[in-house]
Amino acid sequence: MTTATMPMTTADLLALPDDGKRRWLIKGELREQDMTVRNRFHSKTMANVSGLLFVWRSGQPLPRGDVVCGEAGVRLPGIEPETTIGVDVAYVSPDVLVQQSEQSTIIVGIPTLVVEILSPNDTQEEIDEMVEAYVKVGVPLVWLVDPTDRTVTIYRPGEEPTLVNSRQKLDGGTVLPGFSVPVAQIFD
């Protein structure tokens, strides 16, 4: 006889001990892995992307959104059971920010941009699952950054992914108006 288990909630996830494991929920199912010892290329790429987005954000009219990074927790609405993922970098619009409670340590809502930076121990299945969740809930722009190949794969709902390399520019289109940088700058 099989015992049915209840899907995990974001509250259950947040109650787990901080024991060096990376955890996220995909449709109520706990996923975990030993925390990546980030190599300097991953860390440098995260810092560069965050800095470039911060400069862009600083030039935007008020009210401005926030740039968050470093496994920032994001609860994606519209997926049941719950999906809560730690993102490498995200831009969260002012509209989403005003909906946050002062008590919550995670963002509940759809970021405008999610950036995932490939790590040495990421599996293709994990990456595909996260990108699919972002696109499914309507994250307008997802960048999958590969520090090894020095490329960025761009995902937008309803469109085929596109790839840009270090000889091209990365721009935010209508989602991040005015954001445009040489891809090489992300890795230099």
Image: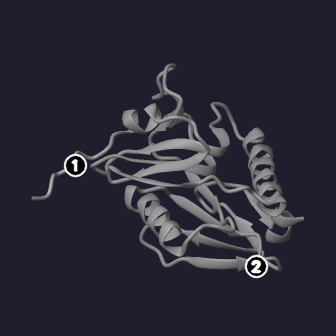
Q: Residue at x 76, y 70 (%)?
A: 147
Classed neighbour count for the residue bearing mark 1: other residues with Cα under 10 Å, few (<14), some (14–19), many (≥20): few
Classed neighbour count for the residue bearing mark 2: other residues with Cα under 10 Å, few (<14), some (14–19), many (≥20): few
Which residue reaches farthest front?
A: 1
Instruction: Tell me the residue that label 2 is attached to.
Output: 149
Q: Residue at x 73, y 68 (%)?
A: 170
Tell me the quarter of the image containing the N terminus: bottom left
Q: Are marks 2 and 1 in contact (CB under 8 Å)?
A: no
Dot 2 amino acid type: Asp
| Mark 2 or mark 1, earlier in chain | 1
Residue 114's image quarter? bottom right
- Asked if residue 40 lies left or right of residue 111, the reply is right
Dot 1 amino acid type: Thr
Residue 63's image quarter? top right
Q: Provide residue 8's location: percent of width, then percent of height.
A: 32, 43
Give the label on residue 5, or none.
1
Q: Residue at x 68, y 67 (%)?
A: 145
